[in-house]
Image (cartoon, grey):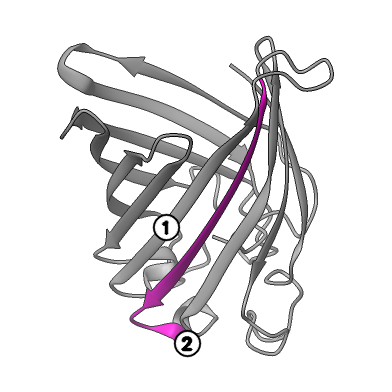
Amino acid sequence: RGQSQTQGDPALQGGIDYAGPEGIFAGVWASNVDFNDAAETYLEVDLYAGITKPLTDKTTGTLKVVYYWYPMADYPTGANENDYLEVIGSLAHDFGGATGTLEVAWSPDYFLESGSAVELAGGLAVPLAGEFWFFDGGLTASGRVGYQWIDDNATFGTPDYVFYDIGLSAKVGVATLDVRWVDTDLSEAECFGGSNLCEGGVVATLTFL
């Protein structure tokens, strides 16, 4: 949601998903992180499960639960922990040539035990070409904008904020290259006591599926 979790350094990520009958799914995903914190947190593991159902011939709804787990964190005595639970509901609608998404997420006790938190975000993806250069899977433009509310801003480290991104995705075979601009409306002074982790930047992602 617009903030770097690796001090701006690259991340290696991977996951495995199960797709069952009636739209049921579950999975696990992991990434290196670097919060530069006293707990020396360097690994995030996300455990999730949910269900996806068609609501109309062009609209699909998804409800899932995600547990964000930081198993290698070594917390000092009395320190707030990073682990938290989030419930996410989303809608995707095919407008014919473009796909719009709407997402709402709620956590009863957000990252660093910062109290309840709500995220609202919307996105749009538009295919630009069925084939592009050697990308036989086509080229797609997409963007997303959202707002994150946090109950205890002082504990989390930032005020409530806007986050957004815009970019291009191109696919060839099992590989997808995504390049986009990711940003927030937070100033350096508002970002974790004066850091550049909330500043905008170009993020390139190579995914194999």
Q: Are marks 2 and 1 in contact (CB under 8 Å)?
A: no
Q: Which residues are magenta?
A: 138-154
Residue 74 in view here: no
Residue 198's x, y, as percent?
Answer: 67, 71
Mainly helix, strand or loop, the magenta region? strand
Query: For mark 2, what is the residue?
Result: 154
Q: Residue furthest front?
A: 96
Q: Quadrant of the N terminus?
A: bottom right
Tag 2: Cα neighbours inside 10 Å, few (<14), some, or many (≥20)? few
Tag 1: Cα neighbours inside 10 Å, few (<14), some, or many (≥20)? some
Query: For mark 1, what is the residue?
Result: 122
Residue 49's x, y, as percent?
Answer: 27, 32
Residue 114's x, y, as percent?
Answer: 38, 75
* Circle 1: residue type: Gly
**In terms of secondary structure, where does tag 1 sit?**
strand
* Circle 2: residue type: Ala
